[in-house]
Amino acid sequence: MVPTFGNSTSLPGAESSAVRNRVLRNTYWLLAASLVPTVLGAWVGMQLGFSWFAGSPLIGVLLFLGIAFGFFYAIEKTKNSVVGVYLLLGFTFFMGLMLSRLIGIAVGLSNGVQLIGVAGAGTAAVFFGMASIASTTKRDLSNMGKFLMIGVILLIVASIANIWLQMPALMLTISALAVAIFSLFLLYDINRIVTGGETNYISATLAVYLSVYNIFSNLLVLLMSLFGGNRD
C-alpha cells in the first residue's frame, strides 16, 4: 500500500491525531529505507575510490551545495507524489557517495571500524533521545527553527573558511557544534510532526535524515580526531 503524502490542511480531534501518527510512522519507515541507499552509496564510493574535488575543496563544496539544493527543490516540488520518494532515495545515495571518503579514512585506522560503530551507536542514542523528548514535551519549540538555521549558516561559513585556515582546533569546534545543532534540529523537526506542523512525510523524512547524517558524520570526525589509532 502506498501511504498518503499529506498536506497542510487542519483536521479536528481524533482525525488530526491519526494524521499526525501516520505521518510520524511513515517518516520513520522512509528514514529507515533511506539508510539503505546511503550505505550502498558509501560502499560504491569506497570501491571506486570516490574523491569529490579533493584537489579543489572550495569548488567541491560549492558544487555539492548546488547539487544538494537542486535535490531539495525537486523533492519539495514532488513531495505529494511517489516521485518524491524516488528523488529522496536518490539524494540519500548521493549523500552516501559523499560520505565514502570519510568512511574510507576511518576504515584505514587501526580502530576505525570500532569508531564507526561507536559513531553509529551514538547517533542512534541521540535520535531516540530527541524523538522521546519531542514526543512528550509540552513546550512550544516553534521558535527554535530560525535560530538553528542561523547556526547552520554559520557552520557552513566557518567550514568554508577553514578550507584556507586549516586549523584542527576549528575543525573540532565545528564538528562539536554541528552535533549539538543537528541534535536540536532532530528535536525540532520531530516535534513539528508530533504537533501537526509538518504533515508531509517526505519533507519530514528529508529534514530528519539530514540531521541524522550530520550527527553521524561529525561525531565520526570527532572520534577519529580524539581517539583514532595509527593507520594500518
Image: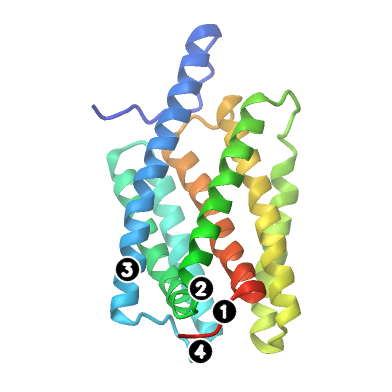
> Which residue matches tag 4?
56
Question: Residue type at mark 2?
Answer: Asn
Q: CA distance from mark 2 to mark 4?
A: 29 Å
Residue 111 to residue 134: above or below: below
Q: Image point 70% across, 72% down: which residue?
A: 172
Give residue 111's mark: 2
- Spatial separation of the CA atoms under disc 2 and disc 1: 6 Å
* Residue at mark 1: 229
Front disc: 3 or 4: 3
Q: Percent position (x, y) of residue 75? A: 40, 49
Q: Secondary structure at mark 2?
A: loop
Residue 90 shows in this picture: no
Secondary structure state at the residue bearing disc 3: helix
* Mark 2 or 4, nearer chain start: 4
Front tag of 3 and 1: 1
Image mark for residue 183: none
**Quadrant where the image shows the C terminus:** bottom left
Q: Which residue shows up at 53% across the image and 84% down it?
A: 57
Specify how the rendered protein is coloured: rainbow
Upstream in sequence: badge 2 or badge 3: 3
For label 3, the residue is 43
Q: Count residues near mark 1 (Cα–Cα under 10 Å), then give few for <14, some for 14-19, many for 20+.
A: some
Seen in the image, is 84 located left or right of residue 178?
left
